[in-house]
């Protein structure tokens, strides 16, 4: 394993040299952080992506699979969200990830390297860090339910998300690495379902057999109201088929958090 800053071309170029396929997953993946501290997010998510693509070309990689974001769609009124919709980013993070898509497409057009962009929809699963306020909502829910304390939900909790289990996203990446005739394309990487934050917290309480009312705070700037992926194109052109329901993924993730309290930074139950 190598550790390097993707903004540092001199550091990453030797690491990527000779690779056949590069999975570009590195980012500062947080809407609120991109608002509160926008410079590092811009540098990593845009400049870093440019350097990865540049190093991929120099190292003669065949393909780069880029982790894009469903946040690029913004608050479109029509659900599910399909790739042909006009992007309407409403946060620096969303704009940065969209810029990465455009860079990937331009590199495919101008430099002869194959690229595929995957717009992730609220990926969750084991090893997701719950220790930061910028973490994904489900990892924060996991920590709260296991510590038997209320989570903070921003807004009324009726905002909906297409939560997608990490194993399905891994499968999508592998299919995107080998599919023919898809260079320069972008695909949705979601489950195709939709659940509100209130419903997610209610399901966790049901699984654990507890009742812990959530706390509510003001809505956060940059957050979209609803999100749901249309995965028709990914199914038809990549052969993608989600294998985990939301509840299955939730139970697997909860089991992992419970079995790894130190890695999850869990506090003992009161």
Image: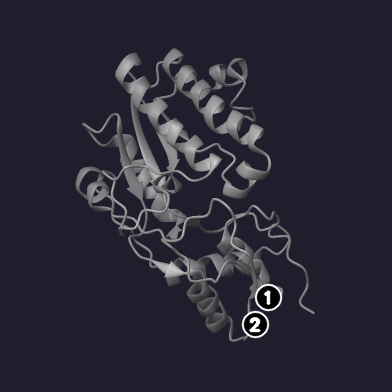
Residue under label 1, please give it.
150
Q: Identify the image quadrant of residue 40.
A: top right
Residue at 60% x, 61% y is: 139
Q: Locate residue 267: give its quadrant.
A: bottom right
The alpha-carbon separation of the residues under discs 1 and 2 comes to 6 Å
* Circle 2 crowding by C-alpha within 10 Å: few under 14, some 14–19, many from 20: some
Q: Position of residue 168 (x, y in %)?
A: 39, 54
Residue 62 in sight here: no
Left-right relation of 243 to 210:
left
* Mark earlier in primary sequence (1, 2): 1
Instruction: Name the mark on residue 212.
Output: 2
74 relative to 246, above or below: above
Is residue 250 visible in this depiction of the protein?
yes
- Quadrant of the rendering where the C terminus is positioned: bottom right
Badges 1 and 2: C-beta atoms under 8 Å apart?
Answer: yes
| Residue 2 higher or lower than 93, as above or below | above
């Amino acid at each position: 394993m190598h550790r390097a800053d993707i903004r540092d071309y001199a550091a990453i170029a030797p690491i990527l040299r000779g690779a056949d396929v590069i999975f570009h997953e590195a980012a500062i993946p947080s809407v609120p952080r991109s608002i509160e501290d926008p410079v590092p997010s811009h540098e990593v998510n845009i400049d870093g992506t440019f350097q990865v693509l540049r190093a991929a070309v120099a190292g003669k990689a065949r393909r780069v699979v880029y982790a894009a974001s469903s946040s690029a769609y913004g608050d479109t009124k029509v659900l599910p969200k399909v790739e042909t919709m006009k992007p309407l980013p409403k946060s620096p993070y969303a704009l940065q990830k969209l810029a990465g898509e455009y860079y990937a497409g331009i590199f495919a057009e101008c430099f002869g390297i194959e690229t595929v962009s995957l717009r992730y929809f609220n990926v969750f699963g084991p090893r997701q860090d719950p220790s930061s306020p910028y973490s994904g909502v489900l990892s924060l829910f996991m920590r709260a339910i296991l510590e038997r304390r209320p989570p903070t939900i921003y807004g009324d909790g009726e905002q909906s998300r297409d939560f997608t289990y990490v194993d399905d996203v891994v499968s999508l990446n592998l299919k995107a690495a080998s599919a023919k005739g898809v260079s320069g394309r972008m695909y949705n990487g979601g489950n195709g379902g939709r659940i509100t934050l209130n419903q997610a917290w209610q399901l966790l309480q049901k699984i654990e057999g507890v009742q812990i009312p959530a706390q509510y705070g003001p809505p956060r700037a940059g957050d979209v109201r609803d999100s749901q992926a249309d995965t028709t194109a990914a199914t038809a052109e990549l052969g993608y088929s989600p294998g985990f329901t939301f509840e299955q993924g939730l139970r697997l993730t909860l089991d992992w958090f419970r079995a790894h309290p130190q890695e999850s930074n869990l506090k003992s139950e009161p």
